[in-house]
Image: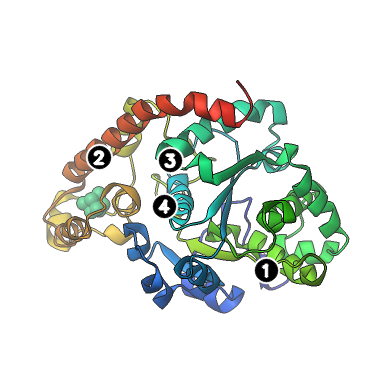
Amino acid sequence: MKNSGISIIDPWGSTSVESYERLFEEFGIQSIGGLVEKLPNVPFFIRRGLIFGHRDFDKIVEAINKKQSFAVMSGIKPTGPLHVGAVLTLREIILFQKLGATAFYCIADIEAYEDNGIPLEESEKTALDNLVDALTLGLDPSRAYIYRQSKENDVKDLAFIFARSVTLSTMEAIYGARHIGLYMSALVQAGDILLPQLKRFGGPKPTVVPVGVDQDPHIRLCRDLANKFKEKMGFIPPSATYHVLIRGLDGSSKMSKRNPMSYFTLTEAVESVEHKLKNAFTGGRPTAKEQRVLGGEPEKCPIFDLYKFFFVEDDAKLMDIYWRCKKGEILCGEDKAFAVEAASSFIKEHQHRRKLFIDKARDLLGLS
Ligand code: SF4
């Protein structure tokens, strides 16, 4: 989206990214490049370049390697069941937690109200379901601060403190013309991101926010505010890692809750997941004959994205699928059968295990 000739990434819209390189030039996001090798463990989703960019991630790498205190912070907006695209963010939070971070897991219910009109009392059940998923995937509650924005006075106080330092034209330059509620929710998010640095959590510390690149405006706003309040409150500008956006099953450039055929959720009926995958767009050719001759295009294929992001952790196996597709040795029908199998077993296992975490999640949210 363009505003007076300046590019704008819309964190509340359907941002698509044509060129990740342009983000480096235009917004100052840096390539994660050699920093990855300095991490003690490099899981498959980092090895494969799915985390492609960063801001100040070197501070986090240093904290990890020197075993210093640091935090990982992320928010889940409780607008509905967690879709598979959110798994990558949760895996990043869990990874940093395992590398020594205290996790700050924010239930972004104020943003869900401002952006999606969902009343706070209605988002509570969704927040519970989402938290059950996060715990099932491995979030360790003993090393996490889990809270709802609407009930966390410190983040709201910070938003009001920050509001005095931001003009309407700054918000318009970052986000475009939006209603005041969204601007307010952006300031609340800045409060979320800087919450780990308050005295009650041990004071200033490096904090990493793993996000999809569409959320960069919030990072830029927050880093700007951290710099403005550095002297008064001691904030260290937050670090961020950026992951690529997973394609929608319908072929759209980003999996989005706005189109149910573009995603599936972790609590969806297995039959429904299978139906969506069988009808998914692919990088295949119009006819089997053409595909045998020309090969498929896994780079454009949401089914291949599912393997790359989630279901095939073995690099050699992933490359085998890639090349068999490129050489026309497999057709989309047979490959989709494999994808259906992989997704179904993941979903079945997840849904079976999540029953173990319902009571814990209720406890954590004070709903017992
Ligand atoms: S064979 Fe598989 S990876 Fe290749 S285009 Fe078809 S569905 Fe995608």
Q: Nearer the viewer, mark 2 or mark 4?
A: 2
Q: Dot 3: what SS?
A: loop
Compared to residue 294, the image places residue 123 above or below, namely above
Real-space Cα distance between discs 1 and 4?
34 Å
For label 1, the residue is 236
Comes first in the chain, label 2 or label 3? 3
Amino acid at dot 4: Arg
For label 2, the residue is 342
* Image location of residue 83, percent across then percent down: 46, 39
Real-space Cα distance between discs 4 and 3?
9 Å
Q: Is mark 4 within 8 Å of ligand 1?
A: no
For label 3, the residue is 263
For the residue pair 22 and 131, the one nearer the viewer reads as 131
Real-space Cα distance between discs 2 and 3?
15 Å
Amino acid at dot 2: Ala
For label 4, the residue is 247
Q: Residues within 10 Å of mark 3 (few under 14, many from 20)?
A: many
* Image location of residue 250, percent across then percent down: 40, 45
Real-space Cα distance between discs 2 and 4?
18 Å
* Image location of residue 32, percent across then percent down: 45, 72
Q: Dot 1: what SS?
A: loop
| Residue beneath the point at 67% across and 66% down | 220
